[in-house]
Image (cartoon, grey):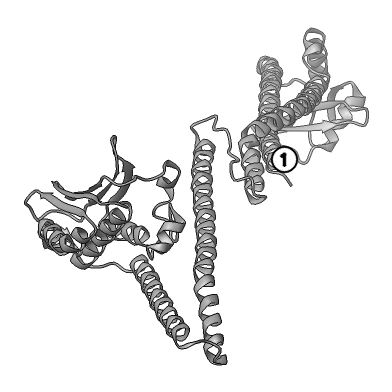
Amino acid sequence: MKFRFKITLCMLALLSMLFGIGGSLLICESFADSLKREKDAAFGVYQMVWSTLQIVNGLDPYLDSEAIKETMEQLCEQKSSAWSALQLRTDTEILYETNPVKASYFTNQPRLPHSEECLFFTIENKEGGAFLILTGAMTANDDEILYLSTAHDISALYAMRQIQQRTYLQVFFVLLLLCAGLSYTVAKLLTAPLQALSQASRAIASGQLASRVLVCSEDEVGMVSTDFNAMAEQLEDKIAELNEALERQEQFVGSFAHEMKTPMTSLIGYAELLQNGLLTQAEQSEATYYIYAEGKRLEKLSRKLLQLLVLKHKDLPLVPLRPADLLEGLVERLRPLCAAKQITISCECQDGQCYLEPDLVWSMLLNLADNAQKAMEHGGHIHFKLEMLEDGCRIYVLDNGRGIPEEALIHLTEAFYRADKARSREQGGFGLGLALCQEIVKLHNGSLQFGNQAKRGAYVIAELKGGRV
């Protein structure tokens, strides 16, 4: 059963209970109040009759039954509309009564009252009429007990109660229908956001990750809708990240397979030639050298891959040191090698200490310098610049080489990516150096930026934010 129907049924049950109890109590209270007024009126008539008899009896203590009957007849002529039937009797005989048909109701009373006692009870006849019976007892002068009974027609009172009950039921059913319609409408409006949430959930489950719900209120349902949208946003981002990671992994595997295919084919070919003994001494020497060179190249590739995987799953401790020492030491080490290629190298450093992992930062700087050298075919200049930051340091690597193609800028840190594949292969590159640099920078809570200078050459900015001493 849908939630809106549950709300509707609950509202109907609540209305039925409250309106039923309230209406019934109101009708009962009204009937009891009217019956009390009838009893008060009947008791007033009863007292008037007894007062009249007491006055007559006081004037003539020896009043006989005929005199009492005559007195009652005179009283009935004056007050006959005050009752439907009247009876005066003793324990043994009826002294006076009016309307014998209705006076027969007096015989159905549960018991006779005691002296100075007054009893009320009601009787309903077969014709649907109702009568209020009042019976009282009083001791006469000769110690004889007289019983005075009056019957008062209260059929109109019962008829009014029936009309009220019938009207109440009609109003109750009309209100029940109105409540059902209004409750269903309100429940539908209240549960509409929940239905929208359900539809959005099914859409997301089917793969439509961009599905969202419209937040129309600030109540609890609106809060749930807002949280759902935030969850869907996070889910979409995570799925996008997973897809990107999967795509990168597929590219990595494809690049790795491609990188391994050429040397392995050559190695197998040269090994077969050597095994068959079909090569001359010079050719054997060349084949042996090629197998050795490609073996060293694969060894270097495996070492790079191992470093890359270790860096992604390791949290290395940082130590305080002067990054200027690393840069100056690197420049002094590379200067002879660069001079052989007609490349000059220099550095400009600010003084200060920060937290670094020295071996990894050294490897990063060496990779950046190696890439800068490969961008220069006929000599050039490499310049390192160090700036100290509040939370670390920033290192610039500037060269005046051929620069970086614009389409390659966003792919430089991807494993096995090479902007110039032919030249990189000739120079022994694998496309893993900048991927390692990216992981090293991440370990220092920093970033790596690439770009081209305005005149000529490229620049790399490495921010290392491991903290200052």
Q: Residue 249 location, x and y as percent?
A: 51, 62
Residue under label 1: 5
Q: Is residue 90 visible in the rendered structure shown here? A: yes
The quarter in which the C terminus is drawn is: bottom left
Residue in the foreground of this view, choosing between 276 and 361:
276
Question: Is 427 positioned to the left or the right of 110 in the image?
Answer: left
Q: Residue 323 location, x and y as percent?
A: 13, 57
Disc 1: CA contacts within 10 A as few (<14), some (14-19) or many (>=20):
some
The image quarter containing residue 196 is top right
Question: Is 205 positioned to the left or the right of 365 in the image?
Answer: right
In this rendering, the answer to whether 198 lies above or below 256 is: above
- Amino acid type of the residue tagged 1 in the rendering: Phe
* Residue positioned most to the top: 78
- Figure label count: 1
Question: Is 283 positioned to the left or the right of 21 in the image?
Answer: left
Residue at image location 37% in from the left, 67% down from the top: 308
Residue at image location 70% in from the left, 29% down from the top: 185
Q: Residue 462 location, x and y as percent?
A: 25, 50
In this rendering, the answer to whether 307 lies above or below 226 is: below
Question: Is 26 positioned to the left or the right of 177 in the image?
Answer: left
Residue in the foreground of this view, choosing between 451 and 10:
451
Q: Is residue 86 visible in the rendered structure shown here? A: no
Q: Residue 395 location, x and y as percent?
A: 20, 50
The image quarter containing residue 431 is bottom left
